[in-house]
Image (spheres, rainbow, N blue to C red):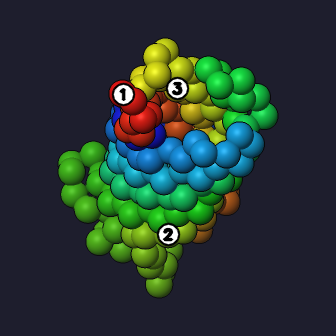
Amino acid sequence: MIHIGPSIYSYIGDMGTFDKTGAGLQAGLQFTKKRKLNGAISLGFGQISDDDPRLTNSGLTNIPSPNSFFKTSFFFTSYDVQFNIINNGSFVFFISQGVGFMAFSIEDENGEDLSAQTETRATNEDYRNSHILLPTSIGTRYKLADHVGLGVQISILNTNTDYLDNISSFGSSGNDNVLSMRFSAFFNLEVKRGE
């Protein structure tokens, strides 16, 4: 089956805990041959943002001085192993664990590239704009007809980076993370013999 649909994303990190939401799109390929254990390939993109005015006047010297706002655009792809806790043919309830890759770019409130603004981070603090991610998910699918279904999936992307907000040493939260809620339409491309 293929799936496609909108997603809502929210960030947790040095600037906040699920304070704001961003939007995006996800699509992929869902394997369904086995009753209990199947794979899925997903790709998606979206945006997250947040601000924390306290970071501007944190008592630090003017340089370096951390950013107080960020907007991050990202793209990811992953392969997930899904375990179907319930699968009665029409309704599926599953948990999954995946591994994948994320690439991102970060802007300040003026639309300027934050990764190039070294004065917003501690001395000699540089980072890559791509990382491994380990998404953990829970979700459901419901078959409306032979070839069409709907689904909802909630995921923690487990990004393995502390730089989605451009802040690491000046922060205290550890790695940044992204909560994703995906709404999908599923289309079964397999045609049964005789149809």
Q: Is residue 17 above or below residue 31?
A: above
Residue at horizontal 71 percent and vertical 24 percent from the top: 88
| Residue type, numbered disc 1 | Glu
Residue furthest out toward the front: 194
**Residue labelled with disc 3:** 151
Tag 2 secondary structure: strand
- Bin the neighbour count of mark 1 within 10 Å (Cα to Cα): few under 14, some 14-19, many 20 and up: few
Tag 3 secondary structure: strand
Q: Position of residue 38 (x, y in %)?
A: 64, 49
**First reached walking from the N terminus: tag 2 or tag 3:** 2
Which quarter of the image is occupied by the N terminus? Answer: top left
Res 103 → quadrant:
bottom left
Residue at horizontal 52 percent and vertical 32 percent from the top: 181
Residue at horizontal 42 percent and vertical 35 percent from the top: 193
| Residue type, numbered disc 2 | His
Q: Nearer the viewer, residue 138 or 190?
A: 190
Residue furthest out toward the bottom: 124
Residue at horizontal 58 percent and vertical 26 percent from the top: 141
- Bin the neighbour count of mark 2 within 10 Å (Cα to Cα): few under 14, some 14-19, many 20 and up: some
Q: Position of residue 58 (x, y in %)?
A: 53, 53
| Front position among marks 1 and 2 | 1
Q: Nearer the viewer, residue 146 or 36?
A: 146
**Residue labelled with disc 1:** 195
Res 154 → quadrant:
top right
| Front position among marks 2 and 3 | 3
Q: Is residue 120 left or right of residue 144?
A: left
Residue at mark 2 to residue at mark 3: CA–CA distance = 27 Å
- Bin the neighbour count of mark 3 within 10 Å (Cα to Cα): few under 14, some 14-19, many 20 and up: many
Q: Is residue 58 left or right of residue 129?
A: right
| Residue type, numbered disc 3 | Gly
